[in-house]
Image (tube, rainbow, N blue to C red):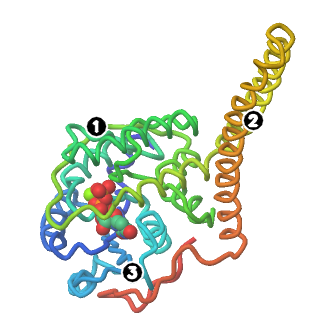
Amino acid sequence: MKGKEGAFTKQMISLVIPVYNEEDTLPALMERIRPVMSEMERPYEIILVDDGSRDRSLEIMTGFAESPEVRVAELTRNYGQHAAILAGFSIVRGQIVVTLDADLQNPPEEIPRLINTMEEGGFDVVGTIRRGRKDSFFRILPSRIVNWVARKITGVRMTDWGCMLRAYRRPVVERMIACHEHATFIPALATHFGKRVTEIEVAHEERYGGKSNYSLRKLINLQFDLVASFSELPIKLIMYGGILLAVLGVCFGVVLAVARLVYGAHWAAQGVFTLFAILFAFVGLQFFALGVIGEYIGRIYREVRKRPEYVIERIYDGDLPQAGEGA
Ligand code: UDP
Ligand code: MG
């Protein structure tokens, strides 16, 4: 669609915001979103997904839901950021869907630029790159590793994997919901389902209040979600590694045999210890391999059980009785 047409048929925008223990930031978040959205002069809605918060977040959000453009989806427990976003996706009404974090690290003032880029360039997905990231070194370093590994392994070309301030067209969102995948990574999934994808730079701010919900354990989990749901590389690596080690083992055996012939039996007795060392290496490798295979089997098991990736307990809606399930 060209820019001109877009001006006549201004498409509705749905903001989807996952919220997990953000009582400190929610009021400020809404205060900053509202003027930005009303300035754009087009229909919009704000969908707040309560991802099982244990503080007063839900109470604050249901207060917001009094106004007609805000809806709150209450999940039954904490499902994780990406599942919460999917839950939000399932009830969107707009044609353009924008995701952002609740902690104000993604400035809402960047939303108009995202939309303009999408409409002027006719893109399906507009990703973002965080300019001047305001996080601690210990939060940035793992992300750098995540970004690098993610790019290498999945082959999905995305510069900054962690920034959730992104815009998707409705069909892309619907394709993502239709996946029914557990343990997924939304930005990567979107690049699979959008044909025209682009990235722009956006500002990044300090967390407004509270603290990051991602511990190192959660980050490692997310990383494995990413790797395991988009590639079988870990399994292949083990296979290649196993083959390589086997070949090396045989070569080493030959070397030992030759040395035995050259230096005699006395020398070979010491070689027993080398063999022990090799054995230990193999045992270690096997355990590692079992661990990775176990990880995959665990994931298969989770998929097979077909548990829903999220359950919406209730939708708080100011004007309309109850939203129908999306997709
Ligand atoms: N979040 C969520 N469920 C979780 C963890 C986080 O919905 O289990 C939300 C959180 O409320 C925030 C966003 O996801 O809106 C990003 O979380 P956070 O700021 O803690 O992550 P970071 O910025 O450190 O990556
Ligand atoms: Mg954050």
Indicate which disc, 3 or 2, sits on the residue closer to the N terminus: 3
Circles 3 and 1, Cβ within 8 Å, touching? The answer is: no
Amino acid type shown at disc 1: Glu
Circles 2 and 1, Cβ within 8 Å, touching? The answer is: no
Q: Is mark 3 within 8 Å of ligand 1?
A: no
Q: Mark on residue 73?
A: 3
Q: Residue 252: where, in percent of width, then height?
A: 77, 21
Q: Residues within 10 Å of mark 1 (few under 14, many from 20)?
A: some
Q: Is residue 294 left or right of residue 195?
A: right
- Residue at the disc numbered 2: 242
Q: If the image is split into quadrants, where does the C terminus sit?
A: bottom right
The image quadrant where one finds ligand 1 is bottom left
Q: Residue 40: where, in percent of width, then height?
A: 22, 56
Q: Secondary structure at mark 1?
A: strand
Amino acid type shown at disc 3: Ala
- Residue at the disc numbered 1: 201
Give above or below for 137 relative to 18.
above
Q: Residue 24: where, in percent of width, then height?
A: 15, 73
Looking at this rendering, what residue extends furthest in the top direction? 262
Q: Is mark 2 within 8 Å of ligand 1?
A: no
Residue nearest the observer in this picture, 317 or 289: 289
In the image, what residue occupies the spot 65% across and 70% down? 302
Q: Residue 133: where, in percent of width, then height?
A: 22, 42
